Amino acid sequence: MKFNFLVICISIFALLSCNISSEKIIDELSIIIISSDISIGENVINFAVLDINGNQINDDLNEIKLRNLESENETIISAKYQNWFKGKGAYNSKIDINETGFHELIITFNKYESRAIFNVNTKSITPPINKKPPNILTLTVKSETDLKNITSDPNPDIDLYNTSYQESINSNIPTIVLFSTPALCVSGTCGPILDSLKKIKKQYRDYNFIHVEVYKNFIGKTLRDLDSLEVTEPVIKWGLPTEPWMFFIDKNGILRAKFEGFISEEDMLIELDRIGNF
């Protein structure tokens, strides 16, 4: 199994996931929908807005609407631009969606309008919120010398590989699982999000933190070898269409939040505190 975006492109620009639902240019603007798993219920939708020269816009948008193309129901939504790293980022909107089918994201900025179409599925293709995710077998190590065989991180933290997923969800404390491939990341966000997790986990000693490498055969590979890469069994079992993904699981093994692509340290802290209250 390979990620479907490997065939489509390397990246439109380095910080964004390349699994793009739709891109449509009207006048001076274009929208890139970054999120690939949108379904009925609670969603986190990330999108970027580019001007006619391909420069990213990060100012407040005048208006953002979500329109179901079949029912024509429209909802005004809010979105906040989040800085990710090195001046890069995307607009972030948390929204409940109650209709399936093709939807249109409509944004207005200054005197210009742009639209992008994406599909809303009945069910999420990744583990659903408020349910126990499928059990997965994650690799662990006993010494730092073994780390190079299970992660492409050039500066791995052994704490992220000491405890398996099965052990974590049976430990009666919250668990955070990050799927990323720092050395072979198409989106360019895997390394920075893993670095943020390494830093923040020091404040949450009573939580489990697990990093899962995306590819089985990453050793000796580069981005030129994308067609020959094979994803790991946990990626397949959880139905991940892109990378990276981060999952927040409470002490009872229930998934409470999930994020595709980059998540800011601020939002990471919010979710860590939130799952600690379940």
Image (cartoon, rainbow, N blue to C red):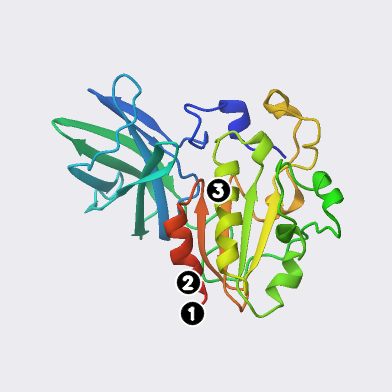
Above or below 200: residue 66: above
Q: Identify which residue is drawn at 51% across, 67% down.
A: 272
Give the Cα distance between marks 3 and 2: 18 Å
Residues packed near mark 3 inside 10 Å, few (<14), some (14 to 19) or many (20 plus):
many
Residue indicated by mark 1: 277
Give the Cα distance between marks 1 and 3: 24 Å
Q: Between disc 3 and disc 2, whose residue precedes?
A: 3
Residue indicated by mark 2: 273
Mark 1 and mark 3 in contact? Answer it, CB < 8 Å.
Answer: no
- Which amino acid type corresponds to the residue marked 2 in the rendered image? Asp
Q: Whole-percent x and y of residue 147?
A: 81, 49
- Which amino acid type corresponds to the residue marked 3 in the rendered image? Ile
Q: Which mark is residue 193?
A: 3
Q: Whole-percent x and y of residue 54?
A: 35, 22
> Taking 150 as reference, is 80 left or right?
left
Give the Cα distance between marks 1 and 2: 7 Å
Q: Identify which residue is drawn at 70% across, 78% down.
A: 171
Is residue 125 something that shows in the picture?
Answer: no
Callout 2: SS? helix
Q: Whole-percent x and y of residue 40?
A: 42, 59
Q: Between disc 1 and disc 3, whose residue precedes?
A: 3
Mark 1 and mark 2 in contact? Answer it, CB < 8 Å.
Answer: yes
Above or below 193: residue 268: below
Where on the picture, by quarter, is residue 191? top right
